[in-house]
Image (cartoon, helix red, strand yellow):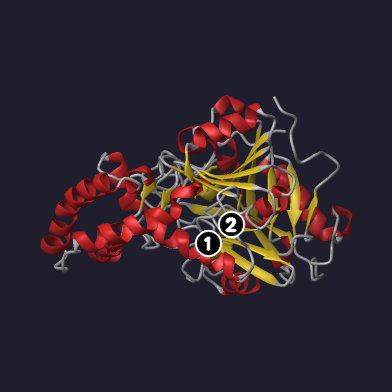
Amino acid sequence: MPALCLFGAQWGDEGKGKIIDALASQTDVVVRYQGGANAGHTVVVGDQKYVLHLVPSGVLHAGKVNVIANGVAVDPLKLCEELDALAARGVHVDARRLRVSARAHVIFEHHRNLDVLAERLRGSDKLGTTGRGIGPAYADKAARSGLRIADLLDRAHLEARLNAVLIEKNALRERLYGEAPLDPRQQIERYAAIAERLRPFVGDTGEELRQAYRDGKGLLFEAAQGAMLDVDHGTYPFVTSSNTGVDGIPSGAGFPARWLDAALGIAKAYCTRVGEGPFPTEDHGPDGVRLREQGNEYGATTGRPRRCGWLDVPALRYALDLNGADGWILTNLDVLSGFPRIRVGVGYRLGKQRLARFPAELHSIDALEPEFVDRPGWDDDLTGARSFSDLPAKARDYVEWIEAQVGYPIRMISIGPARDQLFPRDSRPIWPARR
């Protein structure tokens, strides 16, 4: 079986959780390789809705192995809360179904505190983080002062390392932010206790993944955030702190890049963004409000209302190019029902210059003016469609037109949150042949 990556091809919130859940039934292992509990993947099973933050989206399928790989910033307290919440709903996850990398870096309480305090200090220049401690944890990883899951499992080692770290973090809390210091003893006891609970789940997940692939198992790699939030290739500095696409897999999962068989992007039929940062096709008028309400566009992790606007073709093409996509999956097509006019961004204006591509080299893209093409809308309810031919003619025309504009084939279409509201674009198989 092949190894496939599913990545967000916009600014996140593209519906990745649903797509991963749908395809997880056809694979063996689902792998989360970047991000942290700042992600929120929503999966609907029957009349039940699950919001997953750290546990991979294959967890709702019996018999699937779910891996939190080394590139994920793991808040062990949040992970255990999530496992408890799943168990309370009848989803019991043991060490055969969930594997956690010993090399994954740990988000501590001081990371979450400093994330919130730094945003407060930035004032009007805030980045719009979720306050979950992701950035500070990755910063410590790069500075080689972070602790990994493996470090929690040796009590003496944990005490020595965390005591040393808290000297610096408490100095920051007191002298820069005017906050009381954290009690090192209390912190050590808390994380030593949670480590014992996680111990059975911990292992060398990179080796486990490589062996699974050698054994012919299917692997599905799950990105947590969208390509336009990639720390290297997104709208920096309004990005997340990790590599969000295919480029994050070799380092974030210990899985060789040459072994990946295919990658598919996921994008909405319009665009949304949470938090600060540039958003060229954002609609500040009544259409943007209507998109938010019809699409229920509120953050799964924070509950914040998402900024809404129209599909940005150059940005989507850039994301698919960047990740070497074999195609993409179109979601939320049903949300556009009832709009008499559907706008699509096909380029930008920068002063007198017209740009047909996303200008990733600019230090700021705030000065871009979008160039729109208007397409006819439709009034039909799409949620009952189960094939491309079931869609009304104007919806099919819209799909075919944006497919041609983007230049990458659409492989599947989603027209609602339920598992059965997803169908292939045509007769081509979704899963690639193994290389």
**Is residue 93 or residue 126 the one in the foreground?**
93
| Residue 31 image-quadrant placement | top right
Direction from residue 108 to residue 294 in the image, left or right = right
**Is residue 303 or residue 282 the one in the foreground?**
303
Q: Is residue 248 above or below residue 178?
A: above
Give the CA separation, mark 1 to mark 2.
7 Å
- Mark 1 crowdedness (10 Å alpha carbons): few <14, some 14-19, many ≥20: some
Residue at position x 66%, y 30% from top?
261
- Classify mark 2: helix, strand or loop: loop
Direction from residue 412 to residue 136 in the image, left or right = left
* Residue beneath disc 1: 83
Residue 236 in percent (x, y) is at 38, 47
**Is residue 199 or residue 254 the one in the foreground?**
199
Q: Quadrant of the C terminus?
A: top right
Tell me, yes or no, if residue 75 can be seen here: no
Q: Is residue 342 above or below residue 25?
A: below
